[in-house]
Amino acid sequence: MRAAGGSPAEARVFRRLFGIDGVAAVPANEKASEQFGRVVAGLAARHRGEPPDTLVHVRGLPMPFPEEEALFPELVRRHAFLSGVVRQYEIDQTNCSGLFWALDLARTLLDAGTSRSVAVLAGDCHAGLPLGDRYVAGCTLMGDAFCGLVLDRGPGGLRFGDVVLRTHPEFAFGRAGSVAQIGTFFAAHTRIVREALDAAGFAWKGRSPLLPHNVNSLAWLMFCRETGVAPERVDLGLLPDIGHCYTSDPLLLLGSRLDAAAPDVTPDADGIMLLSVGMGGFVGACRLSREAVQSAGPWIPQSVERAASCPPFPRF
């Protein structure tokens, strides 16, 4: 925060108010390609279905990684798990909710028969960017993380329902907005989230978990107070030491839950809700379940992989 022009006092207030002690950061001697390589290797070890023929790369920062421009074609060449990939897509214009645009794209490709198996790789890092860029004044600190999943129509795994995609043009200023403008965005957070969850079929009176963007703890405390949702339903597992990691938050949280659960554990009847609200007013949400229905949409086998175990960014 000092690098962004903040004072030590501001940092202390931020830490207490928003519940963020530090964030994950890629080690200086590692590249994004190495992080994504670990994610792909993990997917290859876990996935039991048809290998992917399509690769979708999602990021919140609409800029290339500094070390190489052809990162994903290189991943396809280096990893046998991706050797069947014949089409590649990139999503980088919907900020932190880009994962949901990728899920919607995957469903479209699978429904059309264009693809049989889709790998989604998501991740961002701040290598080569000014240190102060991690700080979004009055909102959050950005961390580095990488994750992925494979979607197909095979048996087992988790089925995702309709993907809700929303835009709020009044917040199109994004990170370029003034402190006052970003404040208006933050003030509208509960309303934006409530509308997206309503559209996605969230069980307001149930017990099912919500796996959201971990922007800060205050935003979700206010959400729980204003909606009556029990705080324990909102998974803030990335706070205080990993931080808000752009597009990756819901998948990081989902991966932790799958790792912790026994193979036969079934989610609550109301499923698991994923949600992200991105700067610029982009919003996405969808519900995951294990419903055994014949008209199932794309499935997410338990091959969600993540790499957010980077050293924490120095604390305040």
Image (cartoon, rainbow, N blue to C red):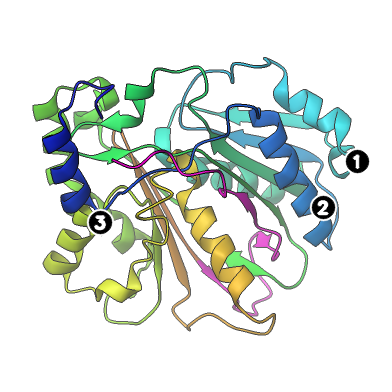
On the image, the x and y values in percent for residue 19 come to 25, 54
The amino acid sitting under disc 3 is Ser
On the image, the x and y values in percent for residue 34 come to 71, 34
On the image, the x and y values in percent for residue 305 come to 66, 54
Q: The N terminus lies in which quarter of the figure? A: top left
Q: Earlier in the sequence, mark 2 or mark 3?
A: 2
On the image, the x and y values in percent for residue 77 come to 87, 28
Q: Nearer the viewer, residue 155 or 133?
A: 133
Mark 1 and mark 2: span between their CA atoms?
A: 9 Å
Label 2 neighbourhood size at 10 Å, few (<14), some (14-19), many (20+)? Answer: some
The amino acid sitting under disc 2 is Ala
Label 1 neighbourhood size at 10 Å, few (<14), some (14-19), many (20+)? Answer: some
Residue 217, disc:
3
Q: Which residue is mark 1?
A: 80
Image check: 25 left or right of 67? left
Q: The C terminus lies in which quarter of the figure? A: top left
Q: Which quadrant of the view contains residue 10?
A: top left
Q: Earlier in the sequence, mark 1 or mark 3?
A: 1
Q: Nearer the viewer, residue 101 or 272?
A: 272
Residue 136 magenta-drawn? Answer: no
Report whether residue 118 is seen. yes
Residue found at x 25% / y 22%: 4
Label 3 neighbourhood size at 10 Å, few (<14), some (14-19), many (20+)? Answer: some
Image check: 115 left or right of 241? right
Q: Are marks 1 and 2 in contact (CB under 8 Å)?
A: yes
Residue found at x 39% / y 17%: 130
Residue 44, disc:
2
Highlighted range, magenta: 288-316
The amino acid sitting under disc 1 is Ala
SS class of the residue under badge 1?
A: helix
